[in-house]
Amino acid sequence: MKRVVHVLGPALLGGGLFASDVGPHAWGHDCSPTNGASDCTQAVVGENRGVITEEVFERMLSASSLLEAFEIAEANVPPGVVSYGTVASIGENGIELTELVLVIDGEAISVNRVVVNGSDWRSMLAGTPAWTDTILEGLDYPVSMMNLPTAFQPLLGDAVRADLAVNRTIDDGLLHQELALRMADLATIDFVMSARAVDHESDDFDPLMLFWPVVINDAELVFQDAGLFAMILQAAGSSTGMAPEQTIQMAAAQLQLMSGQSTNSTTQASIRALTAFLEAGTTPEGMLTISVNPATPFSPFELAAAEDLDSVVEIMGLSIDYQ
């Protein structure tokens, strides 16, 4: 039996909200029997991706450290897929790499420095929630690998350059996630969220929650622009033919209409903050803060049943500030 894993993604780069399931995919390639891939190794290697057999995967899980698991994985991917300058262990659960390059479908993702200060990497490889403290410095991610509207691609150039820090802990089903993203010449984004895993066995479990298996306790997103907003306006203008100022005016007018339909003071204050952000022009200098503090934890699927914007604000405990 062959098992395909995201060799470097979850364990080294921190994964997403929860680590992806280990399944019949290798960096996007479907190796399931229904896809007709009788020899998954050949199918994937032919596309310059990485396949790990069941035996190698078990060796990775039984490794004494993340560094040892990395070395086992590295030895079992095709030549040229992974390269790096130096590698060093940070205790049993950490690793530091410099000049890391992953080549996927002929495109290179490079990171000047990867620091995993600590990570429950065995659980991550197995596809279960995990904790991690990971920093990526000097990440270059090819624009061609992003699923972006065509209008953005010439504006971004060849790659998006960024620094990223992810700190995630899960204790007794309670998730705490912090993310700090610095995109060169675009924006700074800081995100913090506390959420609880959904009990699939509970009587009120909604099957839709399988797509979002947590309820949100609270969250905050802070956005500081450094050119991204102007780029969004420019890209939108290439599709609509509208100048950035016209787009801003139209959006502000729509917000005012929404404010007039609201009877909730928090909704109205949030709309005023968004309007101030828009009216700051194509290069807003302040910080836009979006906070979520619900009276009781909620699932995003509850918002579909909200009757109006005020109901959405009430369910989420939403407030927006700009200064």
Image (cartoon, grey):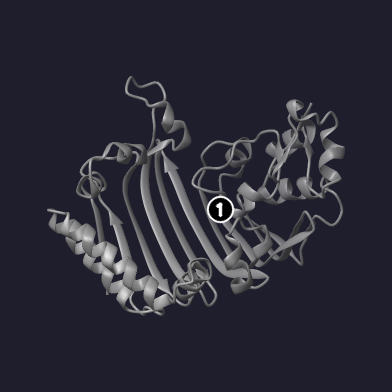
Crowding near the residue tagged with mark 1, few <14, some 14–19, many ≥20 C-alpha atoms within 10 Å: many
- Residue 218 pos. (x, y %): 30, 49
Residue with the most extreme front position? 241
- Residue 93 pos. (x, y %): 60, 49
Quickly name the residue at label 1.
118
Q: Which of these two is toward me, 193 or 88? A: 193
Q: Which of these two is toward me, 129 or 81? A: 81
Whether residue 288 appears in this view of the structure is no
* Local secondary structure at mark 1: strand
Q: Is residue 180 left or right of residue 194?
A: right
Q: Quadrant of the N terminus?
A: top right
Q: Quadrant of the C terminus?
A: bottom left
Q: Is residue 12 left or right of residue 35?
A: left
Number of numbered callouts drawn: 1
Say which amino acid is labelled 1. Gly
Q: Residue at x 18, y 60 (%)?
A: 268
Whether residue 143 appears in this view of the structure is yes
Q: Quadrant of residue 99?
A: bottom right
* Residue 129 drawn above or below residue 157: above
- Residue 69 pos. (x, y %): 72, 45
Q: Residue at x 26, y 40 (%)?
A: 306
